[in-house]
Amino acid sequence: MRAAILTDTTKCIGCRECVIACKKANRLGPELPHRWNLEDGLSARAFTSVLEGPQSSFVRKQCRHCLEPACVSACPVAALRRTEMGAVVYDSTRCMGCRYCMMACPFGIPRYEWDQPVPYVRKCTLCFERVRAGGQPACTAACPTQATIFGERDRLIALAQERIRRQPEKYVAKVWGEEEIGGTSVLYISNVDLTAVLAGRPLDQVPLPERTRTAMQAVPFAFTGVVAAMAGIRWVISRRMQRQAEDGDE
């Protein structure tokens, strides 16, 4: 099963039950008022948020769980990986804190625990353990209007397209997440254009790893080159100091 979430903003009433359920399921603490927090409501203590979109609509924001995730391709130590189910999960024991994933994500999702002595990257994992055990994400289970639902990706896309066909006057003729940057596991349909809310800019269909892979393959070589250069500089300085000491002894 390729797990996915479909959010229909026309059904969302902005109750934020999904936000509360996510915090409870992931044992997230209360939000802290940090000046570096972005305005989208996401943080190391909030994996999902509900934003006010165009025309007083409500839009839920969370990790999009890309089919070909840029964060995974950018991570040099494989701390992030995409599971067979489709969820993009994080292994804190591998993370070295480089934050390449934060820079690579086209949706600006991963957040950093800036206030912790040993900080980790934090984001939605699609409630991977719950789904693997046969359940569904806490957010979709909590939605009282079924504005956000869980299921198999292809079936949810078919459902979304069917809703658009049946009520073309109600919906924009687009399923957000179906094709952008190779497709995502979190999908949206709406009566308003969500591009600015979800990504801030239009995204094409080319998966980002195709663009980042070459650069990331160069990282080990660049790192080795820097280490070698530093070692060479250190040797030159040490040699010069040695010669100066020898000249002083004479």
Image (tube, rainbow, N blue to C red):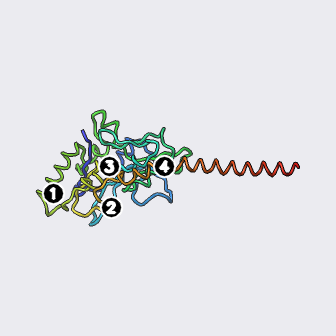
Question: In the structure shown, which secondary structural element does the residue marked by tag 4 occupy?
Answer: helix
- Going from N to C along the chain, the mark reached first, 3 or 2, is 3
Of the pair 112 and 247, the residue shown nearer to us: 247
| Cβ atoms at labels 1 and 4 below 8 Å apart | no
Residue 197 locus on image (x, y percent): 33, 61
**Residue 57 in the image: above or below residue 125:** below
Q: Residues within 10 Å of mark 2 (few under 14, many from 20)?
A: some
| Cβ atoms at labels 2 and 1 below 8 Å apart | no
> Would you identify the image quadrant in which residue 23 lies?
top left
Observer-side mark, 4 or 2, equals 4
Observer-side mark, 1 or 3, equals 3
| Cβ atoms at labels 4 and 2 below 8 Å apart | no
Q: Which residue is mark 4?
A: 219
Amino acid marked by disc 4: Val
Observer-side mark, 3 or 2, equals 3
Amino acid marked by disc 3: Cys
**Mark 2 to mark 1: distance in Å?**
20 Å
Q: Which residue is mark 3?
A: 66
**114 with respect to 40 (left or right):** right
Q: Residue at x 77, y 50 (%)?
A: 241
- Going from N to C along the chain, the mark reached first, 3 or 4, is 3
**Mark 3 to mark 2: distance in Å?**
17 Å
Farthest left residue?
A: 166
Q: Residues within 10 Å of mark 4 (few under 14, many from 20)?
A: few
Q: Which residue is mark 1?
A: 164
